[in-house]
Image (tube, rainbow, N blue to C red):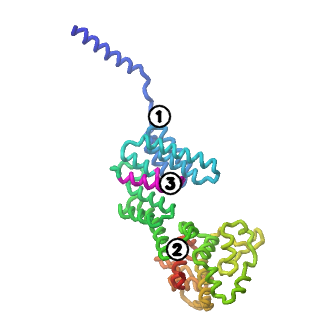
Amino acid sequence: MRRSIILLLVLSVAALIFASGCAPKQVARCTAPEDNPQHHYLRGMEALEKGKIDTAKEKFERSVYCDEKFPQGYGGLAIAQAERAAGQKDSGFRGVETTRAFEHLERAEKLSASDDEKFDYFVAVIRVNTLLQPKDWLEGAAKAYGKIRDLKVDERKLVYYQGTEAAQYYMGNAYLSAKEFQQARDMYSGVLNAKREGKWHEKADKAWKKVDKIVRAMAGITVGDVGKQIAVKDAVTRGDIAALLIDELKIDKLFAGRIPVQSQVDKMQAEFTPADTLNYHFKEEVLTILKWKIRGLEPKFDETTKAYLFKPEDSVRRGEMAFILEDVLMKLTGDEKLATAYFGQERSPFPDVKPTSLFYNAVMNMTTRGIMEGELSGEFRIDAPVDGAEALLALRVLKQKMNIY
């Protein structure tokens, strides 16, 4: 009996060995040293940083081809699809890309097992929501950020993000996109306090400076929807400045209040309507600016059309901004001597603004009154574009100088 049992066991083992030998072996799809999911995921994320969306998508697709259960690859695909969708004006195409993005997110969620994998997934949720902004998107992003805080992450295993402060950086971006400027500043500040020279330090420092300027600009000033939209811009346009002067500074009301005869005010109007403002969303604001003939915002002659146009989409340079605000200040104070106050000076405090420059007098009027500021380097950056926060801050100081509330 015992010998029979032993024989049966031997035969069973032999059968298993035979079966395993005959069964088809699982062939690895990617065998080259650098042809692995982690490598392709990292390269895909780096491509996203550079705005190479199609390249990133290819890398993420390769990562999940190498390993069908690689969650970070699906998270990367979700971000790439969201980037493609966010850049599309066609609603049909955008809808398809949006659906794919959330399908990839769902796949990433199901496959994420470790806290390190879940970290990448939740950051992807924040980024996708910020890009696509579906219903209750900010709440969804904040919820994902809250879950990240409960994770115990081994930062050495974060292939791309390298540090958990990355979640704060992208949550800061979410708040900034939602025009929640104070919360955004707090998030960026958290990144700066997390590590002295981490991967996200430089990005957060730049973002913090931008949003801090916005917060300072809004202190003591009620910024409407137009102001909030313009505040986040890296370069404001002539149309933006027209809208800010009318909606935020109430220029029309202020100027009209300095003309004693109401009938004279009623007769004032723009000499003509520039052709490029006929369908412009700030058309009325532009016409009001033209009515008051503010220097620096006059129509420009266009060689192509041989007509005077307002060119509302042209960026405003810092020198031009000083010129515009100087004229506003002169009209508010009635002091026309401001226009020549610094004529004849031989030396300029700014190496990039010569006393002979068209904008020199305006730059001096604005900087000596603290309405605009030069750089720590000593330059004024006369040809640099004015960003939205800077424009709002200049208007806020101007209002304070004129006691306009």
Q: Is residue 144 above or below residue 344?
A: above
Going 57% across and 75% down the picture, which residue do you hit? 248
Q: Would residue 53 appear left or right of 15 to someone viewing this image?
A: right
Residue 343 pos. (x, y %) = 60, 90
What is the three-letter code of the residue carrying label 2? Thr
Nearer to me, 386 or 256:
256
Predominant SS of the magenta segment = helix
Precedes in sequence: disc 1 or disc 2: 1
Precedes in sequence: disc 3 or disc 1: 1
The quarter of the picture where residue 38 lies is: top left
* Disc 1 crowd, CA 10 A, few/some/many (<14, 14-19, 20+): few
Q: Would residue 140 appear left or right of 322 to someone viewing this image?
A: left
Q: Which residue is mark 2?
A: 222
Residue 207 pos. (x, y %) = 47, 65
Marker disc for residue 148: none
The quarter of the picture where residue 384 lies is: bottom right
Going 55% across and 70% down the picture, which residue do you hit? 224
Labels 1 and 2 touching (C-beta < 8 A) = no
Residue 349 seen in the current view:
no
**In front: mark 3 or mark 1?**
3
Precedes in sequence: disc 3 or disc 2: 3
Q: Which residue is mark 3?
A: 137
* Disc 2 crowd, CA 10 A, few/some/many (<14, 14-19, 20+): few
Q: Is residue 342 above or below residue 253?
A: below
What number of labels is visible? 3
Q: Is residue 304 above or below residue 377?
A: above
Q: Which residue is mark 1?
A: 29
What is the three-letter code of the residue carrying label 1? Arg
Inter-mark Cα distance, 3 to 2 = 26 Å
Q: Is residue 85 above or below residue 301?
A: above
